[in-house]
Image: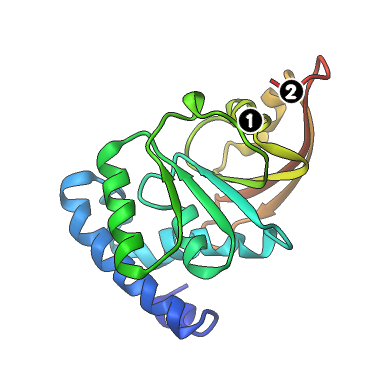
Amino acid sequence: MSKDQLSKIVSRETMTKFERYVQLLESWNKSLNLISSKTAKEIWQRHIYDSAQILSCLSSSKTIIDFGTGGGFPGLVLAMMGPWDITLIESDTKKCSFLKEVARQTDTKITILNQRIETVKPWQVDVITVRALAPLNQLLNYASPFLLDKGVGIFLKGKMLEAEIEQARLEWTFNAEVIESKTSCEGRIIKVKDIKQLSGEKK
């Protein structure tokens, strides 16, 4: 989806935020490597819309944590689109500085934690989002302490998802829904809920 196409499905206010975000991303990327050089010319399709497409998965969710946010995907994009209470967790201090600057310049309400996921004291939320962070079994380990009983993990994954699901089921039980990505023929979105260790206890 191009910038012009995206502008037809989001508000003018959101689009203005996206435009400033992309400007800052292009500028900071020269020193921080926030996105790969291969996708730098396709920011709107590969990063903005790739993140925005999970909007339809959020339903009535109110609280969201985005693990390993990096350049802001998908958490910061979602924060520009809706009224959710969103927390970004990112261990890289320089990337956190970038996220804070984007939030400031776009007037986006967001909470940013400059910590490793393993060091964060869990609190209960409706949704955990992740893009390109770790294999599914590790994501379930990260997410399970944070999710409410009816909470959902929404993970943007690639072509190896089926193998990751098979591996994760050796350690966990969970219900999963796999959705085809709208931005990549190899991309997948997996929605997971009812996450439990095979022992029956959350980690």
| Label 2 SS | loop
* 134 up-or-down from 186: above or below: above
Residue positioned 28% across, 37% down in the render:
93
Dot 1: few (<14), some (14–19), or many (≥20) neighbours within 10 Å?
some
Reading the image, the residue beneath label 1 is: 164
Residue positioned 27% across, 47% down in the render:
97
Q: Are marks 1 and 2 in contact (CB under 8 Å)?
A: no
Question: Which residue is situated farthest in the left direction here?
Answer: 31
Q: How many marks?
A: 2
Reading the image, the residue beneath label 2 is: 202
Could you tell me residue 27's position as x and y percent?
A: 18, 60
Could you tell me residue 32's position as x and y percent?
A: 21, 45
| Label 1 SS | helix
If you read the primary sequence from the N terminus, does the residue marked by circle 1 or circle 2 appear first?
Answer: 1
Q: Is residue 35 left or right of residue 75?
A: left
Residue positioned 70% across, 57% down in the render:
61
Q: Nearer the viewer, residue 188 or 153?
A: 153
* 114 up-or-down from 138: above or below: below
Could you tell me residue 181's position as x and y percent?
A: 59, 57
Question: In what quadrant of the picture does the C terminus appear?
Answer: top right
